[in-house]
Each structure stands twice: as structure tokens, then as C-alpha cells.
Amino acid sequence: MTVLRIFFDSSPAASSIRAFGWALFDERGGCIREGRDTAEHWPRGAKREAVLAADLAPLLAFKLPPLSASRLDGAIRLQLEDRLATPLSAQRITIGPQQRDGWVRVTLVEQTLLETLRQLGIARAFSETELIDAAADTWHWCVSQSGHGFVRRDRNNGGSAFALDLPSANHEMPPELALALAAEATPPKTLRIHAALSAETLSSLKQTNTCRLVVEPPWRWTQAEPALFDQATELLPSIESKASSASRASVLRASNTGWRTAAMLVGVALTLHIAATTVAWSSAWWQRWQISRGWQALAAEAGLSEKTTAAAIATQWSRAYAETRHRAGLPAPDDALPLLARAAPSLQALSPGTLRNAVYADRAWTFECTPLDAASQKTLETNLHRAGLQTMSGSTATGYRLRIQLQERAP
């Protein structure tokens, strides 16, 4: 089956009024035809895949201690909190497996972009940055003939990538590349440049870089190895075709024909069971409704909003309680000093010099610590939970970050 891959260098519109570059690949993964058209002129009858530019699908990497899948997700979200200008809820976060050296690769895509791709009939999406493998001690700067490009770091730095187009002046080293190289504790030994650079730019790169430069032809994503297309991280959940859905439905109907009698008996038994338990469930729902009304009445008496839901009552109650305490000249449980006093017994167990910085904001303390082993982290967080505190933690490039706040419970 042929595959049509469309390269998106910007967010498309559902009406597809813009033209995008595309390439048609055969069953062996070879490119057999290329073009640039709007969606209505794309080749028909082929599976559609989206190749997203580096600025549409950033590829990040974080080095973390060994973590379980559940804790890994929380640690990654903690790392992303102060790195993104948009809320995390607006992004689809795809987390790869943790490597043996601790690196974890994370790809971000806006949810609105994925929805637009679905409307255009796209069945699969992946980042262009994964079409060149992360090598050891080698960075790749890939720039196409149109000037669009990205930099793929080496495996020693997690194999992350960032967008970097060809400079408009084309006679000096891009400052983004210079800063990225200077920020690495272990700079790469080789910088492979897949671009058409001027002699002035090459001279500037040689004068300001200590790594070996290797110049290659301009980057063409259509010429990437077929295996890299297949191995790229899936960013868009697959969409089942109507034909395969109809086929499965036909098989299911044929299978159900032989079990109609048994299904009828099961249906009768379920009906009797539901009828017998309806009264019990109705009573339970009635009690729940009465409790909910009681909470809303109590919230109204406390000066909270009448539209407050049961899930938000605990939060608003604690805030109203804190405001009442403050008006009386008294501290609230989640003020800076009371909250710190509650956490102090657990923090005293840390070695001297472990705590490097502490910031209180939005009814919570955030502590920056030196690196802690997994056992120490678990002990600390367990003690804080016993003290009635809610924690969120994760490892950073320089140590361990811990955020604590008071557990909010309904009175």
C-alpha cells in the first residue's frame, strides 16, 4: 500500500487553503513522486501521514532517576511546568520509554493541531526531527532548500532537538546554535551540517567552534531511511477505517447468531437482577442528593458560591476559612509559617546542606534540593503525607525539586 506523507511547516487550517509539500512512497518505503499542493489536489487512494516540523512538534529530553511509569508522568509534567508558555492541558504529551542512562524523550503537540489533522484525513503523525538518528558525539544541523531546519543533539545529551532555520544574513553562526553548544557540559565532537551554507557562514562556524565540521548536501526529509519513518514516535492515535469497522461488525453478527438463545437467557437474568436492585440504587442516589444539597447549603452559609460543586467545596471552604482567620488577625493552616512548621519534622531528617532554596507562592512551598536517592525521596514524601501534606516532586538537571501544600479535605 502506498503512503502519502505531507510535510507541515506551519499549522494547517481545516479548509486546507494553504499548499504543503508532499511525497508519495511505495510499499518498500521509497519516494516515487513529490509535489506541493492544497489538500484537494493531494494524491488519492493512499494512507495519509503527517510529518511535523520541529517547531510544531518539539522533541525534548530529560535525565531522571529510574522511575515507575506512574511517577515518570508526574515528573515529566513537573519539568514542563516552567518551560511552556501554554497550559499543559492544551498539549498532547507523548513520553517515550526511559533509557538505561536515564534519558527520557518527550514530544509535544498542540491538541488543536491534532484535531485539524484528523479533519484532513491524516492517519498518523510524527516529528521531522526523528527522521535523522541521534548519533554518539555528533550533532546534526539539517536545513532544507527552503531554509527551514532543526538541530538534533547527540545521544549523550538525550537526543533532543530544536528548530533552527537558516540565518537570513547567511554569513554568521546562528546565536541559538552557539548558545546551545556553549550550554552543554559535554560538547559534541562533530557537527554535521546538512545545508547549503555560504563560505562566510562556514568560516564563522570554524572560527567559533571547537568541534569538527562536516558539510553535507541540504536536508531532504523524503530521503530519510525507511526504517526511521516506521520507528518515529506516533503522535496521533490511529483512526479506524469504515471498511474495517464494517467487516468486524459483520463477523460479530455472524458470531452472535449461534449464541442468541444463551444471550436471551442472560438478558432475562440481568433484567431480573436490575429490577431487584433498582430500589437499592434509587435509595442510594436519593441519599447522595440529600448530602449534596446539604453541602451546598453549608457552602452558602459560609459565603461560598451557590454554584459550587461537591468536588470544589473542600477547596473553597479552606480558602474561606483562611480569609476568616486573616480578618481576625490569625494565621491560616496553609500560610507560609504554619505550612513550613508542619513540614519541618520531615525536612529535619535531610542531611545538612541538602536544602538549597525555598519559595512560597499560591499556598504552597517549593524546595530546591541537592540530588537525593530513590529511597530518601520515598521516605521524605511518605513522612510528609503522614503530616497531612500533598506533594509533587521530580528530579531536575541540578538536583531534586519538591512542592508541598496542605491536603484539602471537606470539613
Image (cartoon, rainbow, N blue to C red):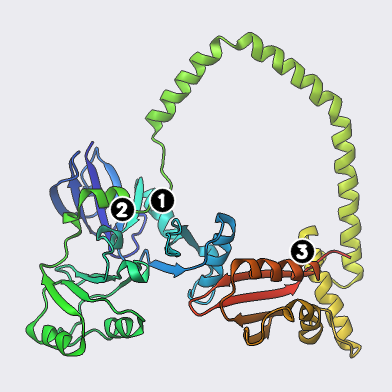
The quadrant in which residue 109 appears is: bottom left
The 10 Å Cα crowd at callout 3, few under 14, some 14 to 19, many 20 or more, is few
Query: Which of marks 3 and 2 precedes in the sequence?
Result: 2
Nearer the observer, 234 or 103: 103
Q: Quadrant of residue 351?
A: bottom right
Q: CA distance from mark 2 to mark 3?
A: 41 Å
Q: Which mark is residue 50?
A: 2
At mark 2, the secondary structure is: strand
What label sits on residue 236 in the rendered view?
1
Contact check, label 1 and label 2, Cβ < 8 Å:
yes
Reply above or below: 391 against 344. above
Q: Position of 188 compared to 282: left or right?
A: left
Quarter holding the C terminus is bottom right
Q: Residue 366 or 48: which is nearer the viewer?
A: 366
Q: Which element is circle 3 on?
A: helix
Residue receiving disc 3 = 312
Number of numbered tags placed on the structure image: 3
Tell me if I can see residue 106 in this picture. no
How many neighbours does mark 2 have within 10 angstroms: few (below 14), some (14-19), or many (20 or more)? many
Residue sitting at 56 percent across and 66 percent down?
Answer: 75
